[in-house]
Image (cartoon, rainbow, N blue to C red):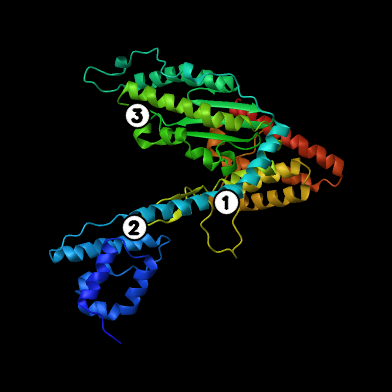
Amino acid sequence: MIKLTKQEVDEMFAKLAHGQLESSEWINWWNLHVDEIKSLISPGDFVRIKFSNRPNPNPYETMLNSQEDVIRYFGKRGIEITADDTYEKKRVCFQQDRLAEATKEYEQRIEPFRQRWEEYRCQHNPYTPPSFDVNKVIGLSNEDPNRLYDQQGYVQNDLCKAFIKEQFKLKLVPLTKAYGMKWKQPYTFIRERNGVVIEIKFNGYFRGGGIESMSTSIMPAYMLLDLPTDYCELPENCKHTQYSEEVFDYNNWRHIHYVKSATLLCEQIDRIVQYLAKVVLPMFDEIDSVETFFAKERLDWYDLMKVGPPMIKFQRGWINPAWNTTSSDTDSSAVPYVEPKYSYMFGIWNLYSGQENTGYEQLADCTAKLDENAVAYKWSFPEKESLTTTDLRNYAREIMRQFAWRFLKTRDIDNPGKRREQIISTYQDVCKILKNAYKY
């Protein structure tokens, strides 16, 4: 076998620098002559130039890396070579082709679920959005921004809170009122319709006089607002819109958290109004009943949206979902743990909708887990027929346990008709208690 010469190595390196080799040709040549190449160039150059054995979906990434180090190899010897951009163009085209293929597969996979959910909404709730022009409230202000500052130029917390409240009156109150929501001062908006509760809540008025966070949720009327499940939130695709990303961007949110500029505060509230008007409220308003909330078409679509469309996240060319909120548990043989609030939510609905065996099984699981917590944490909240918001905030899990037991005890009624009546009566009682406590 004829040994490789230094001139032949340089000629092959020059072809690589000028973009004249295909990846398979380069890799095959390297593997065939690896020992000879190692003896003809320095150890440092060898390590840098050799193609990477690390897996990479884009072969032109490896070609680009080797090309860069080949040019460096020649530069050390005083030979200037300008890199050809062939591999860069091929790398981009390869990425775009793979992304287009992955996107097509993603759309084909989700399209049937999208159609089923849209068909369900059209058949059960032909939605007509309220007539509200959000542009009429953007930029409004009845206050003099300069009034927020003292003589040293610092924001005064009390005046800041009053200014935020005034902004809410001008912008958020008209918007939420158009959707039939009540303003529960200081900063909560709520609505109950056909057994479904919608809540928009702003939290935190402690540091700097501003707002620390915002939450939006939709849930059955028998659920405790402080114990929502992920099905009570927006689908993940709604959390990755232009409006949501602008609202929750730290550089924007800090203007309403640590208030230093009245003008920037107003701009952030304008973003919140846009987000609620364009994304949150239309999505929630389409869910017009508990039946729609628990519709299989909606739950299937919600689960599907936990994984986002494909995108190229890193320069190396890996294509991954834009987001993925599914469980990372890799042990498929393990029995998944179901939080009590899920068993409570689905158990009561299954019981109320006539699937008694499934409902009682889920409520038994809920009470068993919460009974363990009651013993471990020494819960001692007495059962009441009238609750306050403080009770619901401080003893939410204990109250949920008591409600679950109310439903589970109906299992002891032998007569199916009387058992059904008691289930409906218990459902109405629980909803009434929570309605009086939350005042919606």
User: What kind of element bears circle 2?
Assistant: helix
Q: Residue 130 carries which label?
A: none
Q: In this image, 435 relative to 246: left or right?
A: right
Instruction: Looking at the picture, tell me which residue is in the foreground, 276 or 118.
Output: 118
Q: Nearer the viewer, mark 3 or mark 1?
A: 3
Q: Give the label on residue 255, or none.
A: 3
Q: Residue at x 26, y 18 (%)?
A: 150
Which residue is denoted by mark 2 in the rendering? Answer: 87
Q: Position of residue 55 (x, y in %)?
A: 41, 66
| Residue 401 in sight in this render | no
Categorize mark 2 by other alpha carbons within 10 Å: few (<14), some (14-19), many (20+). many
Q: Are marks 3 and 1 in contact (CB under 8 Å)?
A: no
Q: Distance between the residues labelled 3 and 2?
A: 45 Å
The quarter of the picture where residue 403 lies is: top right
Q: Quarter of the image holding residue 199?
A: top right
Query: Does 431 sit above or below residue 7?
Result: above
Q: In which quarter of the image is the N terminus?
A: bottom left
Q: Is mark 3 on a helix, strand or loop?
A: helix
Relative image position of residue 75 (x, y in whole percent): 16, 62
Closer to viewer: mark 3 or mark 2: 2
Mark 1 lies on residue: 373
Question: Which comes sooner in the sequence, label 3 or label 2?
Answer: 2
The numbered mark, 3 or 1, whose residue comes first in the sequence reads 3
